[in-house]
Image (tube, rainbow, N blue to C red):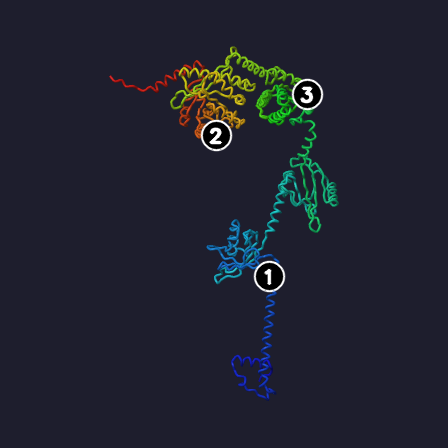
Amino acid sequence: MIKNITTMVFIVILSSFFSIPLFALEFNQQSLGISVYWLIPAGLMTLLITYLLFINHRLKRSQQELAMSELRLKRTVEGSGDTLWDWDIGSGEIVRINDKYMVCQDQPEKNALFLPNAHRIHPQDLPLVDKLLKQHFAEQTAFFEASYRLKDTLNQYHWVLDRGKIIEKDANLNPVRMTGTVRDISHLKSTEERLNLFAKCVESLTDAVAIYDKNYQLVDVNPSYLKLFGGLRTHYLGKQFNLPGYDEKYISEIKANLKESEHWQEELKLRNFKNILLPIEVSIDEIKNSHGQITNYVVLFSDLTERKKAESQLHNLSNRDRTTGLPNRNLFFTNLKKLAQQDVHHALLVFDLDNFKKINDSLGHQLGDSLLAKLAMRLNKLARQQDTFYRLGGDEFALVMTGTNDIHTITKTAKQFLAAIATPFKMANHELVITSSVGIVLFPEDGSTPEILLKNADTAMYHAKQKGNHYLFFNDSMNEQAVKRLQIENLMRFGLKEDHFVVYYQPKMDIKSGLLVGMEALVRFITPKKGIISPGVFIPIAEETGQIIDIGEVVLDKACKDVKRWIDQDLFDGRVAVNLSAKQFSLPDLTTRIDIILQKNHLPSYFLELEITEGTVMDDPQEAINVMRSLSARGIHLAIDDFGTGYSSLAYLKQFPLNTLKVDKAFVDDMHNERGRNMVDSIVTIAQNLELHVVAEGVEKADQLAILEELNCQTVQGYYYSKPLSAEEFTEFLKQQKSVKNKQTTPNLKVVS
């Protein structure tokens, strides 16, 4: 018996499900109490519709809740800025949700072994990503997490933070699915780079920086702090703020001032790590957070030592010469008085330029001032660190050498200054050559006050000026060397007038045939009373005084005359090499002078070779090239003498119109060891590469000749073949050579009877 409607509905549905006709059921009218034949169809239909409406309502409600949940998820993802990804590891497909940088789906690259999106990852970051992902696959990490650069659809790289986890495995526990998020952290990287930049700036500051917390406990210091105060960083961390040498009361005053003004600054005297008291400017600033609360204090220590020096220099500008920048006459007397009070030895050298007035009068005072400024720069560099160079006025200078009365040191310095002054100046299309006279006095031997010392130095300089480009000690007993120099100068001057300079010739021999191919003209100074004066003695003096120009012309003239005679006698057909001094080479009319001598002796330029030292041509390489090209255009051969002993540049060497390189005797003497042999080999190789002839000088032994021949050196000169010979002796040498040459070239004739 069915007691309620629900049971009846169930029966109706059941009968419908099993297709049982409703009328086939037997009902007891008495038990129901009503007639159900008409009620059952209508009721069942109502209930069915009601149930279906209920199911539909629940379904819509579930769909709404699902849509709302998806909306919340979408908004959450959008709000987070993350990109969700789902990786089907088997297929390699990656599905991205809310991806604003990349397409929604990536297909794996062909032949990709592991990372399906490797083509989007920056090549430099790819190894790291691959490593971290493999570690996660190997269950070495709970999550995969990596920062790297990822390319978007516009082919622009972004820094991203990629985090993910394997969420599904197959029956063999192999990963089949992985999900995660990608976050753009480019702005974080930019901030990180800025912070690193600021940190590096603080670390690289030359000023010392210390950072304290709000309780004045030290948090950190930069390297300059440790450089200034010494010690290790850990030694300072956590310590309370203090200033060595200043008590707590002073520190409390600083803190009180900071509360009122947020900034404090003062110049203090603090000791560095060497315990040296230094002027240091200390400044302190508060650092506050966004809420205005103090979080830190930054203390800056600026060493004022250099600034104080600069201020001192500015203060002393009134004591410096405006034209040259050198200390002036006022400071000269002030400092000399201080030295006199110290009771130490020192020397005073007073310089006066010879004939400087002529330059001022002819070229103008402006050019004269420029010349003085350049001269001051050149000479000031030669002074020792403890010495001081002054301009006393006009063309008068002074050098105070502190703490020495050593004659060798003083004379060496005087020579250096004289040589530097005599070196030509190229200014306004002019080559200016000046000389100087130097007077030297010693303290306390030659005076006890600055005034007396200067007076005696001026007296010595006056006597030196009479001798020209010279230096003299005020004390005659210390003037022995200067007297000897003066004697040699006078002898050279007299020798030029009386023809005491003669030319000797040293043969140049072909290393293969042993026959003469040329010779070098060497000057000899033979005096009636003093005999032969060594070139090492008179040539340096001649170069300083400028007499080398006249001597050089005498040698060139005599060499050309002798060679012309030997050519006419059919004794010689090679070249004579004549040394050209630096002063000769710098003459503006050099080529004209040489032309006159060649024409005077009717000698074709083919027979002349000029030897120039490396130092001469490298003083002004471009000007040297111009001069050498002018000489070469006349058919004159050019040689670099003593190659390798100077400071030549191969870049310039290949531009010089050279014909010959001469290997210095020092290298030839050193060939007994491998290093010396290699040096000569290198010079010969350089010459061959530049298509230059090679002459080795100073050959004295057979083993040297053998090595040079092995190294393919072409020509040699030296005592092995002959010492330098006079013109008469060389004539006989030429005759012997001609006889030998004739024998070598005459064929053996067979006599037929």
Q: Amino acid at mark 1?
A: Lys
- 3 or 1: tag closer to the N-terminus: 1
SS label for mark 3: helix
Nearest to viewer (mark 2 / mark 1): 2
- 2 or 1: tag closer to the N-terminus: 1
Count residues near mark 3 (Cα–Cα under 10 Å), then give few for <14, some for 14-19, many for 20+.
some
Residue beneath disc 3:
450
Q: Quadrant of the N terminus?
A: bottom right
Say if residue 412 shows up in the picture: no
Q: Amino acid at mark 2?
A: Lys
List x then y, in percent, for residue 264: 72, 42
Name the quadrant containing residue 488: top right
Residue beneath disc 1:
74
Separation of disc 3 and disc 1 at Cα? Answer: 95 Å
Work out whether residue 313 or residue 334 is closer to the camera in this orientation and state it: 313
Count residues near mark 2 (Cα–Cα under 10 Å), then give few for <14, some for 14-19, many for 20+.
some
Work out whether residue 388 or residue 173 is closer to the camera in this orientation and state it: 388
- 3 or 2: tag closer to the N-terminus: 3
List x then y, in percent, for residue 388: 64, 25
List x then y, in percent, for residue 538: 53, 17
Residue beneath disc 2:
654
* Residue at the (60%, 47%) spot, across then down: 193
